[in-house]
Image (spheres, helix red, strand yellow):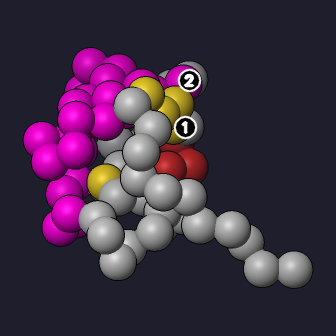
Amino acid sequence: MTEQLKENAARVIEVTAKDLPLHCPMPDMVKWNSHPRVFLPVAKNGEALCPYCGTLYKLNGPAGYGH
């Protein structure tokens, strides 16, 4: 079974340490209509806003070692 890609349309996305280093768009999002990849410092204060699409990413749990 193939994994279904998501549209980059969510406004708030919760992420965990396994998603770090965080970038938008995420790997499970459709690429053809997205903006350039940008890395976001979500581990710094627990949330980060994408400057391209305005999606707010919130870190759920600890960032883990090295982030």
Amino acid type, label 2: Gly
Residue drawn where x is 26% and y is 30% of the image: 48
Determine the CA span between mark 2 and mark 1.
6 Å
44 within the magenta span: yes
Q: Earlier in the sequence, mark 2 or mark 1?
A: 1
Residue drawn where x is 35% and y is 21% of the image: 46
45 within the magenta span: yes
Residue drawn where x is 34% and y is 42% of the image: 67
Can residue 43 be seen here? no
Does 56 sit above or below residue 29?
Answer: above
Crowd tier of the residue under label 1, counting other residues whose Cα lies within 10 Å: few below 14, some 14–19, many 20 or above:
some
Label 1, secondary structure: give it: loop
Task: Report the magenta residues as a range.
Answer: 35-60
Q: Are marks 2 and 1 in contact (CB under 8 Å)?
A: yes
Does 22 sit above or below residue 29?
Answer: above
Residue drawn where x is 56% and y is 58% of the image: 6
Q: Which residue is mark 1?
A: 16
In which quadrant will I find the N terminus? bottom right
Q: Which mark is residue 61?
A: 2
Q: Residue furthest top?
A: 45
Can residue 14 be seen here? yes
Left or right of 20 on screen, residue 48: left
Amino acid type, label 1: Thr
